[in-house]
Image: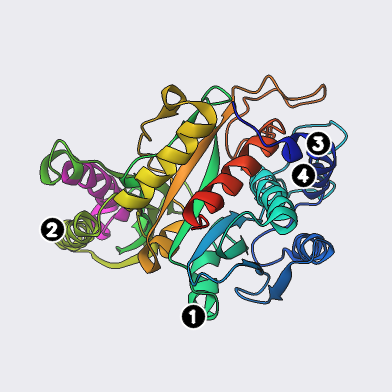
Amino acid sequence: MKLLDTMVLEAASLVAVRRDIHAHPELCFEEQRTSDLVAAKLTEWGIEVHRGLGTTGVVGIIKNGSSSRSIGLRADMDALPVHEANTFAHASQHVGKMHACGHDGHTTMLLAAAQHLAKHRNFDGTVVLIFQPAEEGGGGAREMIKDGLFEKFPVDAVFGLHNWPGMAVGQMAVSAGPVMASSNEFKITIQGKGCHAALPHNGIDPVPIACEMVQAFQTIVSRNVKPVDAAVISVTMIHAGEATNVVANSCELQGTVRTFTVEMLDMIERRMRTVAEHVSAAHEASCTFEFVRNYPPTINHAKEADFTREVLSDIVGAENVLAQEPTMGAEDFSYMLLAKPGAYFFIANGEGAHREMGHGGGPCTLHNPSYDFNDDLIPLGGTVWVRMVERFLAKT
């Protein structure tokens, strides 16, 4: 593993920054303290700072030489509404909020690269450091773009990364094409006719209609989706009734749909609406169907994915750069990849052996109250960002 000496020398101070962020988690669009810390560090290192895009976003600009080429590097800053199970010294000080996805580490790795790039400037062009709020459901990437991110700070390509538990530290993963799914939500309200539970013939019971609907949705995946493609329809909430002896007037279903293509999503939404309306009508009930499209699929561009693989291979060896297995999880970096060429890749976080005494009893997986970012990744991630800049903006 070829780490930059500066990253190793600064490791202790950078770990302290990461743990400070971890101890003070902030939810989407509330990252004021975190953005203050990021802006202060960038300013300390002589980096041009811009604030306010996407509410609490921070953008740092480092220029060198005369080239008009530019590269964007993105890290997310927000935490999750999770009660932390860990009790070690840097555990969350805010009840019900936790960095359970490693965004504290992502932010610190990009800060590590920023410090090195500002000091050494071994590149020709412009580096755009994007510290993004609200990845966890708020669409912070979309909001920064709406606020003119790429108009104000043009880039030729943009790159992002995510730590990935379960892979051995020192491994990376990147591939062209879809790597994370779209995230979408639905809400269906079935309107029946309430009555006494002992006299069901006087009403229209929405509960068996809902059960039939849930079963029918699964046939969309098994019979309308091509077997070699992937899609998930999950009904995660069913709400009906207030008393055991009363047939409810209505029943509400909610859940999520995940796909890797917009075309498949179009088909699933259309089929779900048809199923919901016709199953309801078959039982002389009615329904309202709401479908909200959240994050689009994250689709890596081939050229930029190949570029990323080359950089990673130089650092950790080609044998440690794996094919990126697509996941049904979603990521709002997808909006940036719709706007600009780029790639999103994984850096291994290990199995959890790095956690100190006082960690929770659960596994070290994403969105788990016992999770903690692996600080050994900070020099590695910082090195990756620097080498990507130096290769992308190589001096001629």
Which sits earlier in the primary sequence, circle 1 or circle 4? 4
Residue type beneath disc 4: Arg
Select label 1 or label 2 by which is in front. 1
Disc 4 to disc 2, how far (Cα)? 57 Å
Quarter of the image where one finds residue 35:
bottom right
In the image, which is nearer the foreground, mark 3 or mark 4?
A: 3
Q: Quadrant of the N terminus?
A: top right
Q: Tell me which numbered mark, 1 or 2, is placed earlier along the sequence.
A: 1
**Marking on residue 9:** 3
Dot 1 falls on a residue whose secondary structure is helix
Q: CA distance from mark 1 to mark 2?
A: 52 Å
Which residue in the structure is indicated by mark 4?
18
| The magenta stretch spans residue 208 | yes
Q: In the current view of this chain or complex, which residue is farthest to the front?
A: 396
Image disc number at residue 325: none
Q: Position of residue 363 (x, y in %)?
A: 62, 25
Specify whether residue 105 is painted magenta: no
Quadrant in which residue 156 is drawn: bottom left
Label 2, on which residue? 282
- Nearer to us in this view, 36 or 377: 377
Mark 3 is on which residue type?
Leu
Residue 32 visible at all: yes
